[in-house]
């Protein structure tokens, strides 16, 4: 059920349905080719780089991330070949502008060999990330370090946390969407017990899942041990984080939602007519909207929308997106319950839900288009990353859902005004209901089946035997319920609508699962960025000295010459740099000043200045030129031949 059901003989509305389908597909597939924001952070560089061999021990180890992360003093560990800690354990914040870099200082007197760097952090969108790499001092060696195979957010705790996230989404959708269905589409549903139970189950599910997520958050982002879920110290640390504050706020809002549900199914349900309910509709509508928006905001403030470009716009649009999902899919669940369990539902209520769902789809079109632009950013990321493929799967499921909704609308047009159209039927007949039996419906031993009536043989009648009277009452109730179901299911329109809505609900269950996995998957643009960094390392050129000759002209008298540079061994890590400056005649010549720096533009690293020592006239040496990772480095040389005559020349070199 996704759009307003057209009246019979109104084919002019069909283009609207087709347009909605095309717009929704475009919203999810039509990603911009320009840059977009990433959500999960990713490690984009390190110094020393993974696999680098440095001549001497560096002063510190630094890590560069694509986006802001949260780290503690023990988040970066550097381990010697023997397994001992090589770092001081004090985190250094080296961030500057858009550059996100952290490091730890190393102890003095470190031995030669292979060192392991293990790190763990929490991304700005609340997801834990971790990894490890190694570098060598002097030469590679064997290492006794054994890192755990389980990554941050994995194991049993990770599975439980992911289940809790799925259940919390489902509880939110059922609670908000079911209540909206009753209030906006079917006021009479406030007094229907199955609908009441559905919304109540949604509230209980959301409450329990939120509490579980709050307890599991500490081990999920930290130790991975389930026992830490009940550690007061760990819980206190969680409450101090952004995600902890969001989960606590969600619990408080769930308490407010309980009051809303109590009024909806209490005083509101007991009011008889629309006029009697009108005074409560405004209060419930405003209060319910505020609570629902607040609940949706707890996700927007702590996950993908809260980081990247334009969070001021992304967060309110994310709230609208979640509310639209709840109104559409939660209302669908309430409609399904009404069709299967309620004795009757008005055609007008189904049509009102159809209009509500159509509006929700329009909101999803706008917000989905914007979210896709932020998270994917390119067509290659759409087809070449796990996030993009999951997004395509979500598009396919939504297309199936829209198709099932179109079938439901066809059945809606055939509905009678009220289903079933049997007057005086009740969902739960009591013991005193007089249900005449006939044929197979007659209760054996009663007057209706031709058997002896009460006291016909001179014995006591049912009225004199309480046990027998209770038994007959239960039989009459069972017969009444069976007759009610037969009458209700005899309408082919209602039966067809039930089947199509059930198919929609089945797709919704899978769709919510894909959406949950999607929110925990590395966004396409971030994944591509990390893949490029790994590819640069994997395709590094073989070790060889890099020789470069750069002619220069400072513009002054005797301002021409050539700078010759030799970088050995020409790979990431430590290198020796020899620089020679020759005049036009090929002989060495001194210059007033000489500067050399390296910049890796692709990863926004540098410029890294190289300190030079003068060995002889026209000859300089740098014995430790550190290049943290492979790639296309821009070598910049500045030559000054007098107080005012100066020039800068660039050359790109491939570093393995």
Image: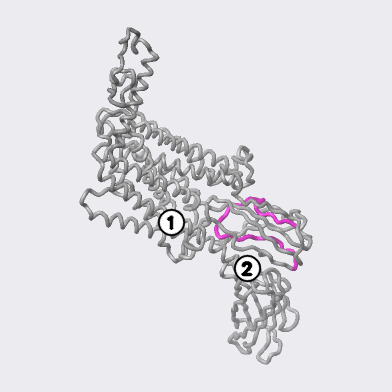
Q: Nearer the viewer, residue 389 or 618?
A: 389
Q: Position of residue 592 (x, y in %)?
A: 67, 81
Structure colour scheme: one colour
Q: Could you say which quadrant of the image residue 77 lies in?
A: bottom right
Return the residue nearer the eye: 396 or 327.
396
Numbered label attached to residue 371: 1
Q: At numbered mark 1, what does the secondary structure look like: helix, strand or loop?
A: helix
First to last magenta residue range:
55-80
**Of residues 82 and 573, which is closer to you in this image?**
82
Residue 444: x and y, percent? 34, 20
Residue 15 lies in what quarter of the image? Answer: bottom left
Q: CA distance from mark 1 to mark 2?
A: 32 Å
211 up-or-down from 628: above or below: above
Q: Which residue is mark 2?
A: 538
Residue positioned most to the left:
9
Neighbourhood count class around disc 2 (C-alpha, 10 Å): few under 14, some 14–19, many 20 upward: few
Task: Give percent across and percent down for residue 303.
Answer: 50, 50
Sequence-earlier tag: 1 or 2:
1
* 335 to the left or right of 386: left
Q: Closer to us: mark 1 or mark 2?
A: 2
Visible in this render: residue 359?
no
Q: Is residue 432 above or below residue 362?
A: above
Which image quadrant for residue 633? bottom right
Q: Is residue 619 left or right of residue 12?
A: right
């Amino acid at each position: 059920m996704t759009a307003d059901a057209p009246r019979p003989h109104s084919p002019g509305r069909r283009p609207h349905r087709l347009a909605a389908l095309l717009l929704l597909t475009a919203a999810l597939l039509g990603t911009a080719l320009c840059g977009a924001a990433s959500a999960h952070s990713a490690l984009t560089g390190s110094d020393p780089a993974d696999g680098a061999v440095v001549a001497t021990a560096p002063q510190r180890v630094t890590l560069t991330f694509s986006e802001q992360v949260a780290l503690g003093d023990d988040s970066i560990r550097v381990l010697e070949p023997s397994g001992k800690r090589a770092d001081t354990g004090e985190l250094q914040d080296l961030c500057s502008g858009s550059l996100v870099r952290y490091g730890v200082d190393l102890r003095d007197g470190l031995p030669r060999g292979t060192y392991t760097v293990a790190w763990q952090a929490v991304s700005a969108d609340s997801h834990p990330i971790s990894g490890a790499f190694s570098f060598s001092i002097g030469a590679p060696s064997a290492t006794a370090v054994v890192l755990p195979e389980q990554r941050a957010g994995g194991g049993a705790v990770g599975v439980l946390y992911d289940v809790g996230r799925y259940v919390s989404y489902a509880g939110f959708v059922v609670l908000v969407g079911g209540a909206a269905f009753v209030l906006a589409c079917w006021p009479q549903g406030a007094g229907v017990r199955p609908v009441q139970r559905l919304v109540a189950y949604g509230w209980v599910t959301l409450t329990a899942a939120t509490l579980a997520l709050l307890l599991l958050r500490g081990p999920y982002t930290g130790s991975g041990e389930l026992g830490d879920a009940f550690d007061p110290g760990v819980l206190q640390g969680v409450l101090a984080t952004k995600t902890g504050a969001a989960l606590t706020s969600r619990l408080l809002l769930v308490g407010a939602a309980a009051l809303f549900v109590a009024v909806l199914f209490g005083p509101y349900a007991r009011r008889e007519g629309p006029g009697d309910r009108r005074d409560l509709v405004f209060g419930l509508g405003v209060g319910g909207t505020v609570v629902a928006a607040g609940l949706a905001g707890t996700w927007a403030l702590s996950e993908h929308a809260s980081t990247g470009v334009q969070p001021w716009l992304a967060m309110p649009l994310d709230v609208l997106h979640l509310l639209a999902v709840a109104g559409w899919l939660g209302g669908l669940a309430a409609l399904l319950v009404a069709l299967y369990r309620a004795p009757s539902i008005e055609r007008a209520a189904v049509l009102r839900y159809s209009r509500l769902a159509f509006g929700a789809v329009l909101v999803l079109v706008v917000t989905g288009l914007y979210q896709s632009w932020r998270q994917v950013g390119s067509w290659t990321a759409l087809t070449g990353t796990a996030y993009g493929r999951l997004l395509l799967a979500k598009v396919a499921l939504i297309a199936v859902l829209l198709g099932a909704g179109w079938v439901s609308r066809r059945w809606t047009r055939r509905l009678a005004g009220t289903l079933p159209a049997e007057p005086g039927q009740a969902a739960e007949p009591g013991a005193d209901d007089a249900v005449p039996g006939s044929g197979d419906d007659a209760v054996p031993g009663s007057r209706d089946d031709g058997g002896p009536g009460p006291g016909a043989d001179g014995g006591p009648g049912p009225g004199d035997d309480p046990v027998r009277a209770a038994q007959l009452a239960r039989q009459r109730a069972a017969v009444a319920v069976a007759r009610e179901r037969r009458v209700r299911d005899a309408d082919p329109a209602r039966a067809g609508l039930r089947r199509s809505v059930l198919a929609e609900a089945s797709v919704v269950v899978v769709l919510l699962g894909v959406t949950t996995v999607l929110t925990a998957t590395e966004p396409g643009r971030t994944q591509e960025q990390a893949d490029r960094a790994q590819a640069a390392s994997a395709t590094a050129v073989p070790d060889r000295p890099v020789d470069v000759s750069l002619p220069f002209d400072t513009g002054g008298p005797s301002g021409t010459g050539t700078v010759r540079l030799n970088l050995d061994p020409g790979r990431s890590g430590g290198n020796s740099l020899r620089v020679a400056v020759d005049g036009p005649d090929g002989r060495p010549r001194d210059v007033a000043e000489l500067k050399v720096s390296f910049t890796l533009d692709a990863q926004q690293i540098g410029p890294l200045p190289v300190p030079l020592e003068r060995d002889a006239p026209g000859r300089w040496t740098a014995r430790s030129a550190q290049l943290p990772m492979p790639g296309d480095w821009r070598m910049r040389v500045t030559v000054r031949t007098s107080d005012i005559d100066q020039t800068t020349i660039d050359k790109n070199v491939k570093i393995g």
